[in-house]
Amino acid sequence: MGAAPANISITTRDGDLARVMEQRTSTPAARLRAIAALRAAGVPVRVMIAPVIPGLTDLEIPAILKAAQEAGATAAGYVMLRLPLTGAPVFSEWLERTQATRRDKVLAWIRGVREGQLNANAFGTRMRGSGEIADQIGAMFRAFARNYGLDRELPPLDAAQFTPPQSASGQLRLWLRPPVRRVRAGGRGARIVAAAAIGLRIGSNAFRCE
């Protein structure tokens, strides 16, 4: 327990779709095997359904969560697709070439979760989208994540098990946080954090000015 977790993304369980959408990447089956192998080694795993493509892969959410839970995943998350900058024409061309009958629906649904655009990057909604379609996808994800016991956080990292590497040259000490000695600095309410406060040594002392 307390091992560093792993996050593994699964966009689809459809092998044919994966071959044309995520070429030269691990197959869905291989990603599930990776989850199983990591869990067998004691590593907590979060499955990420990322990105969810409205109108194309959103209905696979229950099946992906079920397969991930059976493989040993301990938590789950999702990210809604958005298409910034050159991503929009590239994705649109890919739809036209490989999913011609679904192209218009998929683009319309993406606009439905992105305030009428293909991209919306407002903080708080860029990862989940907004609007009725986004709400329905989110509700489906939460219901099935709860059903499969994946609606939980990963266990906290146990940093006590980490031993900083030692080097005869002393070079790695650059990244070890030294004790910080506090000194007063002028200026009403001003706080200055010296370089030593982020783990660098100045001579033999570290200083934080307040």
Image: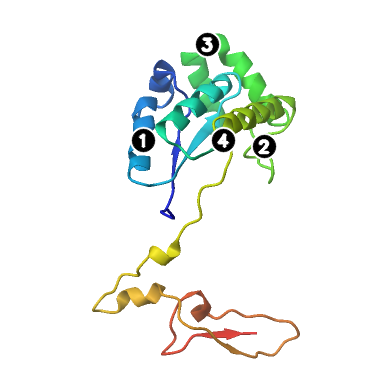
Proximity of marks 1 and 4: CB atoms separated by less than 8 Å: no
Vertical placement of residue 4 versus 107, above or below: below
Classify mark 4: helix, strand or loop: strand
Give the quadrant of residue 127: top right
Cα distance between the residues tagged 1 and 4: 20 Å
Give the number of the disc on residue 78.
4
182 sits to left or right of 168: right
The x and y percentages for residue 114 are 68, 31
Q: In the image, which is nearer the foreground, mark 1 or mark 4? A: 1
| Foreground pick, 129 / 116 | 129
Give the number of the disc on residue 66.
none
Q: Could you tell me the amino acid type at mark 3?
A: Ala
The x and y percentages for residue 41 are 33, 45
Q: In the image, which is nearer the foreground, mark 2 or mark 1? A: 1
Cα distance between the residues tagged 1 and 3: 36 Å
In the rendered image, which residue does mark 2 sit on? 120
Decide: few, some or many residues near mark 4? Use Cα within 10 Å; few <14, some 14-19, many ≥20. many
Q: Could you tell me the amino acid type at mark 4?
A: Tyr
Q: Which badge, 1 or 4, comes first in the chain's sequence?
A: 1
Classify mark 3: helix, strand or loop: helix
Q: In the image, which is nearer the foreground, mark 1 or mark 3? A: 1
Which residue is at a point 42% across and 35% down the rendered structure image? 72
Cα distance between the residues tagged 3 and 4: 26 Å
Quadrant, the C terminus: bottom right
In the rendered image, which residue does mark 1 sit on? 36
The x and y percentages for residue 115 are 73, 31
Whether residue 83 is visible to the viewer of this picture, yes or no, is no
Q: Could you tell me the amino acid type at mark 1?
A: Ala
The x and y percentages for residue 53 are 56, 25
